[in-house]
Amino acid sequence: MKNRKVLLNVLLLAVCSLLFSGYSFAKDPVKIGLVTSLSGAFAPQGEEVHRAIQFAIEEANNNGGVDGRQVEVQVADDESTPDGARRGSEKLARSGHNLLIGPIASSFSLTISQNLDRWDAIYFVILSKNDKITGEGCQPRMFRVNPGDSMDLTMMKSWLESVKEKKFSILAVDYIWGRDSAEFFQKTAKELGKEIDEVMYPPMGTKDFAPYISKLNASGSDAVWVALIGRDIISFAKQAQEFGLRDKMRVIGHAFIFNFAVNAAPEAMAGIWGNIGYSASIDTPKNKTFVEAWKKKFNREPTENEGQAYNGVQAIFSGVTLAGSTEPQKVADALSGATLETIFGPAEFRAKDHQMLLPNYIGQVKKEGDSYKPVIEKTFDASIIPAPNDACQM
Amino acid sequence: MITLQLLNGLVYGSLLIIMASGLVLIYGLRRVVNFAHGSLYMLGAYIGYSVSAYTNSQWLALLVVCFLMAIIGYLLDKFCFKILQDRDPIATVLVTYGLLLVFEDIVQTIWGKANYSLDAPEILRGSIELSGMPFPIYRLSIIIVGVLVTACLFLWLNKTRIGLFVRAASTDPLTTATQGVNTDWVSGSVVAIGAALAGIAGVVAAPFLSLAPTMGSDILVDSFVVVVIGGLGSFGGAFAAAMIVGQLQTFGAVYAQDVASLLPFLLMLVVLIWKPSGIAGSRV
């Protein structure tokens, strides 16, 4: 009798622990694969991405998880190379962390996107701008949360109509993205009746911009369109300041006025205009909450890259919640065509090409308070975003 | 315009000669192809940044960098190059390249991944008018530093007793040692000077570049092109090559931009085919 009672107690305990453990692991965790540049040329941007994604995950877990699930993350360093991005993504995806996010350059994103079906993964683009991502290289399991080149350039075109400068020069990195940007700008300027003067393509990693800047100074242009990447942005801004280029012409940057460059060379970046992908000053309830929480933790405002990376993770969370699943295909099906509440306000993932339709911004680097930062001067509504590219066949 | 571009070429050439002269000296004495030289340049720039931020004096930063880099150079020679000098060249390349990566990681651990920039000294800011165009005073001062470094090294090598030992040791270290010259001490001094020069190049370049852990490997390629064109171990050859490469890069960027980045490599190829020992052979 006594033995039966003990057995009953043990059974009761076992049932209870099974019930409770069953409760806490009722749903599979959200497994994020964060692949970004922790070393190499893009390491400063990679560090921003890493910080923002870890912040978003910690925040979600502190608030009870996503769709009743814990969020887990594994990190891989892409070493600032496309092959590193492919290797890192494959390793993470095959270990079950198949909700991928984090790479910076477009070539990295395009390399990853070709393998998503094979790895059974889904990939969220947060910083890569090339139009191929939502054009001929689009994939049913790839979603972009940042504005692409054509979105930036369409906005720039609207803005340039109101700009008084007539004669432009172009300085764009000798790389597919820089060449595309220069080509688009030439076409746009001609359509707007502006004149194009010097067109120069310095190689990636140029250390001395003096020959190019001397040529610009001698050109008599009213403004220069600059499309550079990584550290070249800082080197150019500092050398342009040395040669007094900004006294001679307006400098307009394409994907140029980033916080990492402004923090490194604030006075050299001051007065440079360009597109802004995200700013802490965006006036939406979600962004205010995000900025407040961020300031509480880091004692400063989030940067442009951090804001966009945060937005990317939120898109993953929304996808999991909408799908009620962490399976990449189900998440993709749920997000395609869905409208999400984002830090930019309500934004749709266009079903045709999986581009998030966001407002876009133009501004300049200014001193506000004690520090220099990119400040939004004009906001452009999502309605100006060009139609999807027919080359995208999902 | 052409005058300005000539000056731009001279500026970059001067930076390259400060950098490459260290490489040449080290190879001349130790026969070590020092891939870690780029990291000494990078380390110099970072130390210069920190000292300048702390003391608000770029001049003091330059002095501290010279001193610290010379110590690092001496230690490198004592614990690395001396051991490597008789080894297979591939072992030297692997070890010095490994050192480059280690230094990059150390810098990343201490200073983080963010980019930094160093301001030029107050007295050298601003620009002067040349051919109706502004030209930064700081860049003119780089040419002066380049000329000073070259002149000092030339005098040191040709007019001093230790310079004589250096030249003798680079030609025949064994015979030099049998004459009572402490060749290890001579080599240690030369590597210390080479490392200090790399540090100076880092501090000099920092005001117009952004500081990043990979900046050393970026300039290393151009420096090796200069050393190979000039002749491994030849100081005069490296000087001529640095000036030629500086002008090639500048005028290439202006007049032949599609092939500008190829020009120094094309020149290197031609020199290697025409005279594999470089413009001036291998004597220091």
Image: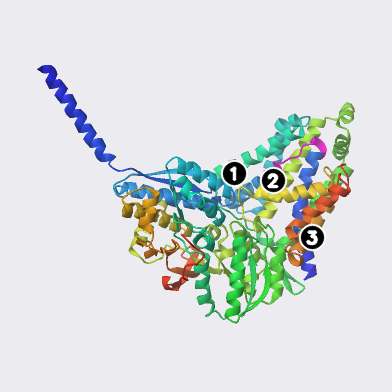
Give the residue number, with chain letter if any, for mark 1: B107
Viewer can see residue A175: yes
Name the residue rendered at 59%, 59% in the picture.
A229
Distance from disc 3 to disc 1, alpha carbons, whole Å, reads: 32 Å
Looking at the picture, does residue B216 appear above or below residue A391?
above
- In front here: B1 or A91? A91
Q: Are marks 2 and 3 in contact (CB under 8 Å)?
A: no
Q: What's the magenta region?
A: B28-40
Neighbours of disc 1 within 10 Å: few (<14), some (14-19), many (20+): many
Residue A55 horizontal/vertical position (percent) = 40, 50
Q: Earlier in the sequence, mark 2 or mark 1?
A: 2
Query: Tag 3: residue type?
Result: Gln
- In front here: A305 or A324? A324
Query: Tag 1: residue type?
Result: Val
Looking at the picture, does residue B134 appear above or below residue A290?
below
| Colour theme | rainbow
Neighbours of disc 2 within 10 Å: few (<14), some (14-19), many (20+): many
Q: From the image, which quarter does the C terminus of chain B lie in?
A: top right
Image mark for residue B247: 3
Give the residue number, with chain letter if any, for mark 2: B38
Viewer can see residue A78: no
Residue A310 horizontal/vertical position (percent) = 42, 55
Name the residue rendered at 69%, 36% in the picture.
B94
Name the residue rendered at 11%, 17% in the picture.
A2
Q: Are marks 2 and 1 on the same chain?
A: yes
Residue B110 horizontal/vertical position (percent) = 56, 43
Q: Is residue A60 left or right of residue A134?
A: left
Distance from disc 2 to disc 1, alpha carbons, whole Å, reads: 13 Å
Q: Chain of mark 2?
A: B
Q: Secondary structure at mark 3?
A: helix
Neighbours of disc 3 within 10 Å: few (<14), some (14-19), many (20+): many
